[in-house]
Every structure is written in C-alpha cells, then in structure tokens.
Amino acid sequence: MFTDLYEKLINKEEKLSLVGLGYVGMPIAVAFAKKVDVIGYDLNEKKIELYKNGVDPTNEVGNGAIAASTVDFTADETKLREAKFHIVAVPTPVNDDHTPDLTPVEGASRILGRNLTAGSVVVFESTVYPGVTEEVCVPILESESGLVCGRDFKIGYSPERINPGDKVHRLETITKIVSGMDEETLDCVAEVYELVVDAGVHRAESIKVAEAAKVIENSQRDINIAFMNELSIIFNKMGIDTKSVLEAAGTKWNFLKFFPGLVGGHCIGVDPYYLTYKAEMLGYHSQVILAGRRINDDMGRYVAENSVKKLISAEKPVRNARVAILGFTFKENCPDTRNTKVIDIYNELREYGINPVIADPAADSAEAKRLYGVDFCDMKDIKNMDAVILAVSHDCFKKLTMNDIGSMFGEGRKVLLDIKGVFDRGEYEKAGYIYWRL
C-alpha cells in the first residue's frame, strides 16, 4: 500500500498536499509542483486568493513563479482527500510565557485528520520538541480519521530549513533531514524529497532524532549570537568598538563569525524554548540555553536605553524627542514582521515619552498594523529628526548615502544608531555625528 506511493506520485496517479502556505510551505508546494500534482491548502482565504491571482506576498519565489505554478491553491479542506502524501508546514510559536504554542500544528492535524484517507503518508515539517509528532499529532490524526497509524497511514518528520529572504540557501540547495516511523516510510519520504532537493537528504535514524536536530540547530545559533551581544555590552562599557574587535579576531582560521544583533523570527528566537520546555518536563532546568535567551530577549531594551543616552549627550530633550526607526521586519530583505524584536525598541522608547516613527519599505505594513497596531511612514517624510535608528539592514537601506541620512535630521548634533554596523563609523563621526552600534 505504501511501497509504490512514490511511483504513483511521479506517474501522477496520486497527489501531494501542502498544509500551510506561508514562507515555508508555499516554496515547497511550488517546487514539488514541477514534478508531481500538488494541492496547496491554507485556511486563510485571502492568502489563497492572492496566490490564485499570481501574487506572492512572501516574496520567497516571486509573482511570476506563483502565476506559472500548477499548484491547486485552495482553502477547501476537503480537497486534501485527493492527496496521499501530505506535508504539514505550519508555524510553531511560543506563548507569552515562552511555553510552546502547539495550537497551529494541532489545528492542522485536526483538519488533515478529518480528510485523511487510508494509504496516506503524513510528514510534519513544523519545528517542535522531540516527541510532538508521535505523541501529539498522531493521536489527533487517528481520532479525527478513525484510521490507525502504522496500519492505515504512516508518519514521518522532515524539519524545514528554508531561510526566509535568503536567495542562496533554498529548499533545493540545503541538505534535507528526513525520517519515518519505519524503514518503509523512511524510504518513501526520502525518495519524495529527493525529487526537489538537489543537495540530497540525510536519513535520521528516528523521528525524535530529526525533531531534536532541528531544534538544536537554531539553539546553537541563538547561543552564539547571545555571546556576541554580551560582548557588545561589555565592549561598549569599555569604549571599544565591537565590530573592530570581531574583524580582528576573525582573522584566526577557527574563529566563528557571528555578530551581535536583534534575534527575532520564528526559529532562532523560538526553538530554544521548545527544547528547554521539554527538558523541564524531564526535570532538567537549562542553564546555558536560557541564559542566551535572556540576553537576546533584552537587546531591544538595551538599544532603546543607548538611544536615550546618546540623545542626552547630544543635549537633546528626551521627552518628545523626534526619533525614526528604519526597518521593522525580523530580518533583512524579508516582509515578515512576526516576532520582530524591533517592536521592543519602539515600546521601550515610548516608556521614555518618545513616540518614534517607523519606516520600512520592505515590510508587510498590513501585518504590522494587525499584530502591533503600528503605522509606517514614508521614507521621504522622515525629516527634522533628533535621532535615527537603523534597525534592519535591508538592501534598500544599505544604498542610503550620507546625504540621504543627513536629510532626515533637524538642527543640532545628529544621533545615528546603526544597529547592524551598515555604515562607516569613521566617516559619520568625522562628519560630526554621534554614532553608536552594537
């Protein structure tokens, strides 16, 4: 029943479905549609309409690729009954108390379960702590479908590694971890993903191993960035430029090239909490991982505090100071504002009586308004500022000249906080700016 599913997919006798068409799911659907028949399901009807009209709100593959794709985009969950190989790619956020929010993956499991047919293989891509696929998702699939896992359907896990906004590290070019509940499932899952992943697959020995591999990838990166952020705090107190220190240290062959910055998004700022939550369930309280999280979660407040200090050094009144924030997304060249840490800078400045204006030509302004209640201004309207904070290193901001930056300021000393170190510190200080960066 399962051994010939791969053959049936490539012969277009069976279909593949994608449940969840966001920054991760949509590029997967488009890639598979070049090889097999694909049903792309999302419960967001507005998003589906955009896709049907050839519009890519994520900017991940572009409008042309969406318009040319043969994906059957739908918000009708019953269409999932036409598919036999299902990939679930929904987000796994955290609650305000940093505990895992499994609501999206549980909801997707219910929807898929209601429409699951015998002989199906279900692969989850959502980042979770080890055990979620088999202990949380499978019981939901079974109860909703009336089918039995292992007999009527099989389960696998293949963690997503797509890097939103990155045009180099894509689905096709990143080695794909695959896993299955048994050898038969693993073979099927591996063969199917090899259709689209040019870099090949790595067969994990179990679903839990694959889940753990994903969650530690971003935890490792989070800890390394936290170390850089802590160094930037220390060096700032010493009056030493962190970027210059890292450039010098980076000349050693085995020095890891990480940089300080705001850590947001749905992976690096979230995944460590999934791991530590599971560890605490087992009686172990994380020390290193949570220490890194505390440092990174506090960086927005740290940037705001230094903005205020620089305003004072420029002899500008803090209350009602005119401050512009350039960039609001969680990372550069990506419209996604979910879980952005720039909002922490904004909120902290408001605590000081400052009402900053925000400009971000690359961001999804409707999403930012819905999630945070903020409105963006046009870049050309940023004038007479006391301070400018470059928070996100979009390519469009990197192209700004000193004249462009200068036109944003009013009278008195110009305060520029270049969080990512995009501009030449020496040039701006020579021009009389009060310049600060992490």
Image (spheres, rainbow, N blue to C red):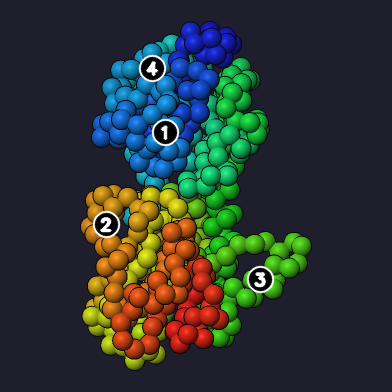
At label 2, the amino acid type is: Tyr
Residue 40 coordinates in the image, percent (x, y): 38, 25
Between the residue at mark 1 and the residue at mark 3, the CA separation in whole angstroms equals: 40 Å
Marks 1 and 4, the one that precedes in the sequence: 1
Marks 2 and 1, the one that precedes in the sequence: 1
Can residue 270 be seen here? The reply is no
Asked if 363 appears above or below 321 in the picture, the reply is: above
Between the residue at mark 1 and the residue at mark 4, the CA separation in whole angstroms equals: 32 Å
Between the residue at mark 2 and the residue at mark 1, the CA separation in whole angstroms equals: 31 Å
Q: Nearer the viewer, residue 210 or 424?
A: 424
* Mark linked to residue 116: 4
* Mark linked to residue 219: none
The residue most toward the front is: 403
Q: Residues within 10 Å of mark 3 (few under 14, many from 20)?
A: few
Asked if 222 appears above or below 239 in the picture, the reply is: above
Q: Is residue 6 left or right of residue 366?
A: right
* Mark linked to residue 247: 3
Please name the residue that numbered disc 1 is placed on.
64
Which residue shows up at 39% across the image and 42% down it? 58
At label 4, the amino acid type is: Leu
Q: Do the residues bearing badges 1 and 3 touch, measured as CB atoms within 8 Å? A: no
Residue 294 coordinates in the image, percent (x, y): 46, 65
At label 3, the amino acid type is: Glu
> Which of the two marks, 2 or 4, is nearer to us in this view?
2
At label 1, the amino acid type is: Gly
Residue 322 coordinates in the image, percent (x, y): 27, 78
Q: Residues within 10 Å of mark 2 (few under 14, many from 20)?
A: few
* Mark linked to residue 372: 2
Q: Secondary structure at mark 2?
A: helix
